Image: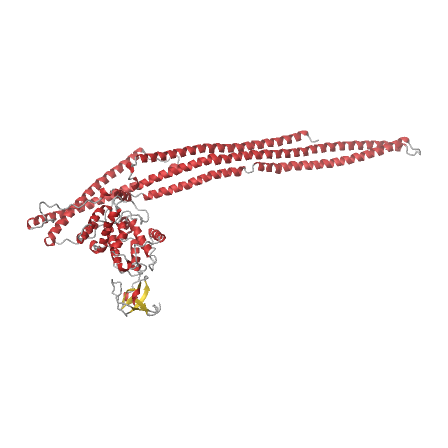
Amino acid sequence: LLSPFIISDIRQQLCDQLKGLEVKLDVQTAIVSELQEFFRRRAEVEMEYSKSLDKLVRQMITRHRAEKQKQEQWATFSTYACWKHLLGITRKQSQDHQKIGEIYNNQMMTRLTEIVDNSQRIFKKCRDIGAESHADMLKALNELQSAMKTYHAYQSESKQAEQKLRNVESQKNKVEQQLTGKNTSSRKLKGLERQAEKRQAKYSDNKLKALKARNEYLLSIEAANAAISKYFSDDISDLMDCMDFGYHNSCGRSMMMYLSVHEHLKNTHQTAIDSLNKCISDLDSRADKQKFMELNNSVFMLPKKFEFQPFKGDEVRQISAQKPVQEDLVGRYQGICDRLDCLKVENDEIWKTLELTEKALVDASQDKDYDITKCFIEDNPPVKSPQESAKQKADMLETESYYLSKFREYTLSCNRLSRLQAKQSAIQKALGDNVLSPPPSLPPKPIKRRLGRTPNVGQPKLFGGSLEEYIEATGQEIPLIIKSCIRVINLYGLHHQGIFRVSGSIVEINGFKATFENGEDPLLDMVDASDINSVGGVLKLYFRELREPLFPLHLFDELVNCSREEDITARVERIKYLISTLPRAVIIVMRYLFAHLNHISEYSDESMMDPYNLAICFGPTLLPIPPDRDQVSYQSSVNEIIKTIIIYQEDIFPNDGGEVYEKCIVEGKEKDDTLDEDDETCSTPSDEDEPDIIEATALYDFEGRTDRELSFKKGDILVIYQQVSSDWWEGAFQGKEGLIPDKYVTWKHSR
């Protein structure tokens, strides 16, 4: 028989399964509860951290406001931008961490609570389903047990009926043997025959019942085995999958929310890193110095020159070189010359030592001691010993002290040189060339020596940079942007009305600016005046964004005083003297620019840009008015100074070498410097290379105002090459090439 213990064991196994699934649910909910506890506490930490960061920012701002009067000039320093960015980054971090705390405390907690509730709800329903499955399975087992009992009972009855049938048949056979040979029938035999028939009928009936019971039993076995196999193979797995439905996905989505928080933090950190990198790249000691001097221009402005104060009618204002003092002056002159020679040698030696010491200090300051990567990679990163740090600091202090002592010597030496050179020039002027042997021709003014140089990384800054530093770094006497813009204006803009006054396209100007900043020339292929206003705009923008304006701030008052000088000769001489004090690189650029502006003013009847109009356009850019001065009242003086320099540029700027402006620029020269054919070949091409000649007839007499413009009479036949602007054509007349005004000619043939 099917043991009840087997069914009991199966029933117990099924109950243990449900208990195990309950334990599994408890583990899953416990894990989610731990996540809830973690994010709850993490939210508290984030909120506390946010409050601490916000408190730090508010304390720093309050402190800054409390000392606002002491910190009025902070904004002029590039390091102030670092301070502001640090506060801004910290404030953003405070806001972000507050938002993170709110996300963890609200959205994350709600999401995790829903996971627990969903898991418990689904488990209860799945447990009921499992219990129903168990009941069905146990029902099948009970049916199997019942079928087995029925089968065994019918089989037993069938065996008993068979045995009784055999017993009756045995008795019947014995009686038949006894009656063999007798003609009489026995009542006993007839009784046994009737009994045998009954036993046979009962046996057949029991045999049929046993057969049916066995079939039912076998069917019950198949059903029970199938039920158990299906449950343990599929149903229990499906039941567990149903219980876990959405659990892992929901937990994963919760972690995705946490990951999204860190992605946002990563982006915020990257933004902070980019802004700090920009702040670091914008740290500029010379720009800070320039802004500081502009803010305090009154104390850094060049004082007025000392004038001779005559005593009681003494009107002689020059050094006297009369006979009684001439010999003394000559002696002093020779002594000053000898002293100057010695001082120059000494000054050069001091400068070389100073330069080497400065290089050593700069190299020491370039040490990458700021890199703390090892602190995050190694558990115990190597640390400098106190003795090593002390020695390094002592060496730095010693080098610094030596540098400052040499700087002191160099400064005092330069001052002595300046005083002696002034005396030498004054005595030389008083004695004249008749008394003294003429001095040798002076070499070009040397490049100004600069202290505190920082090593350049990559291309030097063009817009917003220093003109001197750019020229020194690139070796270009005239920066590419100045040379290229002036070349295009020379070719296509001299006759353009409102050049420099009419605004260009902001998009085009910014495009030109970006290309020039990359070291390329966007104007190289320009062949007409369609973008000429944008070319003028980017040139003005370059001068406007220079870190130090072309005319330094400390000369502002002196230059303004020059504008009030009525005697134009004296004014020009004074301006010439002030400009001569500037670095040679700046003077060469000034000479190039003002020669170009003077050239433009020659066409003022067409371009409407006379020296005064050009001064209005360039005055605020080249000679900005200090911010503490009245912009309106000083503007006329600034315009007058720039106008004077434009008109008298040949008298003001020395012709002592360096690149000079050329009025006649051959178009295409910048594109191809390999052409070595002479002018005659270029102006008289062969018939095979040149298309049909276009000729024009002069309508009026025209007298060229420059070497570039052709002169002709009414009725003359002129050869036309190409159009260079809406008002001018390039052509030739009597073997000479030049410009021809469009309105003065008519075409002999169709264009």
Q: Looking at the image, which is closer to me, 372 or 257?
A: 257
Horizontal side, residue 714 vs residue 415: left or right: right
Q: How many numbered callouts?
A: 0
Residues 561 and 426: in front is 561
Using the image, determine if residue 385 lies above or below residue 595. Answer: above
Image quarter in which the C terminus is found: bottom left
Residue 657 percent location from the top left of the image: 22, 55
> Extreme left residue here?
324
Can the viewer see residue 367? no
In the image, taking residue 322 as reference, residue 111 lies left or right, namely right
Seen at 26% across and 63% down, the residue is 709
Q: Residue 576: where, in percent of width, then height?
A: 20, 52
Residue 474 image point, x, y percent: 29, 51
Residue 582 screen position, x and y as percent: 22, 49
- Please, is residue 661 above or below residue 67 in the view? below
Answer with left or right where residue 26 lies relative to residue 438.
right
Residue beneath the point at 37% across and 39% down: 88
Which quadrant would residue 452 be assigned to in this image? top left
Quarter containing the N terminus: top right
The answer to whether residue 101 is seen in the rendering is yes
Q: Coloring scheme of the render?
A: secondary structure
462 and 330: which one is in front?
A: 462
Dividing the picture into quarters, in which one does residue 654 lie?
Answer: bottom left
Q: Residue furthest right?
A: 183
